[in-house]
Amino acid sequence: MTISIILKGMAMGIAEAIPGVSGGTIAFITGIYERLLKAIGGILGPKVVGSLRKEGLAPAWQAADGGFIFQLGIGMVLGLGIAVLSITKLLDMFPPVVWAFFFGLIIASAVYIGKQITRWNFLTIGLLVLGAAFAFWLTTINPLAGSDSPVLVFLAGAIAITALILPGISGSFILLLLGMYTVVLSSAKAILEGDTSGLVTLGFFCLGCLIGLAVFSRVITYTFKTFPNQTLALLTGFMIGSLRTLWPWQNVLSTRINSKGEEVPLLQQPVLPATYEGESTFLIGAVVAFLAGLAIVYVMDRFGPPTKEEVEVLEEA
């Protein structure tokens, strides 16, 4: 069992639990993005199914990169638990500090992904602007009303799960926009409390997630192979556009009731520290946290494994 894969999964799990932060971003900057896409797309692919039918479970497990998925899954579950127990409390106590950390993390990640683009032209610049505009627009629209209709729950799962493999777009934030965040969490909470009434809702949601992952991972894998620069430009734009959600100082415009019956922010407006309506701006802590977010990505870039392009240059030399 590889500890590094579990740790990367933990980081993804923590990210996915926080509206505005994407697990796909963490996968990209930790160097497992392409492997994750390939593994997800191959789970229901002909190679895995053929191995299962002709050779048995062990070869199919290997063909699906099952060990990687299993270890990453363990890490994500642990990360979600950590987020629930600690990150959410830190957000309640020191919100500007936590958001400043993620703000720095995403800025540095956008620069990191942008550096992978080998050729800039009007198309790549246009896609970057388009991605940024789309992600920014998502942060400004009013959420829809939720529904426990199986069809809508299925579609919500299929759409929201794409955030697992799209840097810059948060799955939990997409669920908020679709009005499904409370619906899904309430169903999960009911099941944990022994009430089976949420099984149908959660079942359709998980089915939507499974289908969404299987389809969309193949689409992204294809675009990466066929149009790498254009795909990277679009993903970089997504990350830049999502920064509005992560700005450390936000005043609440409207609220929602979460699965615990608590009133929490829904729509917020970025403001300068001087006009922040929170208890404290935590300005010094926010600056330190922002720099820490930048530093983490720099260290990963500086000391992480070489990219494919770097390997090719080294081999040619």
Image: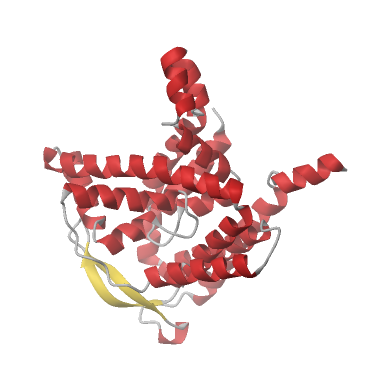
92 and 132: which is toward the camera? 132
85 and 67: which is toward the camera? 67
Q: How is the image coloured?
A: secondary structure
In the picture, residue 201 is in which quadrant? top left
Residue that appears at 45% across and 27% down: 46
Q: Position of residue 104 (x, y in %)?
A: 56, 66
In the rendered picture of this protein, how many numbered marks are placed on residues? 0
Quadrant the C terminus occupies: top right
In the picture, residue 294 is in which quadrant? bottom right
Query: What residue occupies the far top of the structure in this picture?
Result: 55
Note whether residue 30 is visible. no
Residue 69 higher or lower than 212, as above or below: above
Residue that appears at 50% across and 48% down: 220
Residue that appears at 27% across and 50% down: 155
Left or right of 240 on screen, residue 195: left
Q: Position of residue 92 (x, y in %)?
A: 35, 64
Residue 195 higher or lower than 292, as above or below: above
Left or right of 61 on screen, residue 182: left
Q: Position of residue 177 (x, y in %)?
A: 30, 64
Note whether residue 269 is visible. yes
Residue that appears at 33% across and 48% down: 158
